[in-house]
Amino acid sequence: MKKYLFKRITALVLSLVLFSSCVSGCTGIEEKEYFDTCFIAMDTQITLRLARDSGVKDGRKTIYHEDTALEAIAAECANLAAQTESIFSRTDENSLTYEINSEADSFFELDNEFCELLKRSYDISDKTEGYFDVTLGSVTELWNVTGEEPSVPSEDEINEALSHCGKDKIVLSGSSIIKNDRKAKLDFGAVAKGLALSKIIDYLNTTEVLYGLVSFGGNVAVFGNKYDTKEQIVKYKVGITDPADTSKVVGYIYIENGYVSVSGDYERYFEADTVKYHHIMDPKTGKPADSDISSVSVICNNGALADALSTALFVMGSEKAVQYYESGVYSFEAVITKKDGTTIVTDGLTESGAFEKYIEPVEE
Ligand code: AMP
Ligand code: MG
């Protein structure tokens, strides 16, 4: 095995600190370990850190990938995100999801990718007792938390919207769907970024880039293997934002591969009469989940699942979320930050030492 000498880096979830040099840091400086770049897709900034080392040595000299080659790889990643958005966006008038959500028709032929994600989402919904629910579109549209002038809907409006939710309203049959309720709407907001991230990582694994990291809103993924001088795999240190003060972290997760997805009440919300209304809805009430959780980070080996589970666990609340972890329905780890400021770390993370709590330095 070849030896690589690398520095450990820190990736802050939901923070672009690491990538702030992404515009100036992209060109021709051979000593730089990474090619950094960023682009916007799905209303979110996506940042890529691609290792520049090609793994080939010329005598003692490392041969780096050409910047133009890495730019082309980054462009393909941007394409994959844009293509995912063009299918699953709830707001893009040209997307298939938008077309299905319109009230015009009740029968739709699906392409393979749409069919797969809908099937997967319904399955995750079944396995999370409905806490994750992609049929909540009429409710999320009503609240319109990220819209221009969101306001608190009336109980009647909420109940009306809720009456159009449920898998029985949008039935998947082979490669088509039948809408039994024309007002029913799909919302893939809790899973599509994770899917896009999985697609990007699957693609990067087919390229000659040896290792790197992709950050996409509340989702981060690490790919490839990075070695230190002792030929040990180097882990990435991913900071978990403190919901009470987003300039701080509650701790760090160390990962060498896989996905971290964060759902938090501080990410998207509006305020009315000093009450905060966040974007993660309880499918049972049709309102922002009244959870004792402020943020939940899920670590697992699939991007779409990590994304969907972080949303579901948030809605469950901490007690149920821990029971769910212990039930073993899915294999994942999690860090839960509660509203009271305490943090719950799942057993797998504690036992492997992969979580490090942040300890505020004591002033002298
Ligand atoms: P995330 O930030 O991944 O937790 O996803 C939240 C987004 O998913 C929201 O902005 C909504 O578009 C949608 N959403 C909200 N509540 C739910 C839920 N309980 N199940 C599935 N999707 C949801
Ligand atoms: Mg999610």
Image: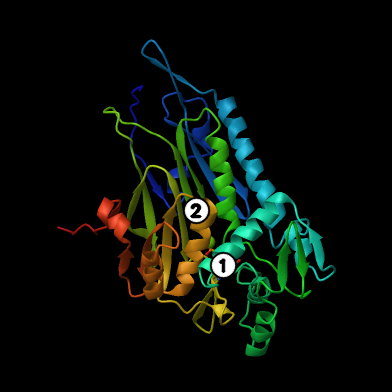
Q: Is mark 2 within 8 Å of ligand 2?
A: yes
**Residue sitting farthest toward the front:** 174
Q: Quadrant of the C terminus?
A: bottom left
**Residue sitting farthest toward the right:** 104
As displayed, is residue 59 above or below residue 337?
above
Provide the residue designation for mark 1.
Answer: 125
Q: Quadrant of the N terminus?
A: top left
Residue 196 in picture, x, y percent from top left: 59, 49
Query: Would residue 174 appear left or right of 49 to someone viewing this image?
Result: right
Decide which of tag 1 and tag 2 comes sooner along the chain: 1
Provide the residue designation for mark 2.
Answer: 219
The residue that appears at 80% across and 61% down in the rendered structure is 108
Q: Quadrant of residue 231?
A: top left
| Amino acid type of the residue tagged 2 in the rendering | Asn
Q: Is mark 1 within 8 Å of ligand 1?
A: yes
Residue 40 in picture, x, y percent from top left: 61, 48
**Count of labels shown?**
2
Residue 181 in picture, x, y percent from top left: 76, 76
The residue that appears at 30% across and 51% down in the rendered structure is 354
Q: Is residue 38 at all visible to an observer of this figure?
A: no
| Amino acid type of the residue tagged 1 in the rendering | Ser
Q: Residues under labels 1 and 2: Cα distance?
A: 20 Å
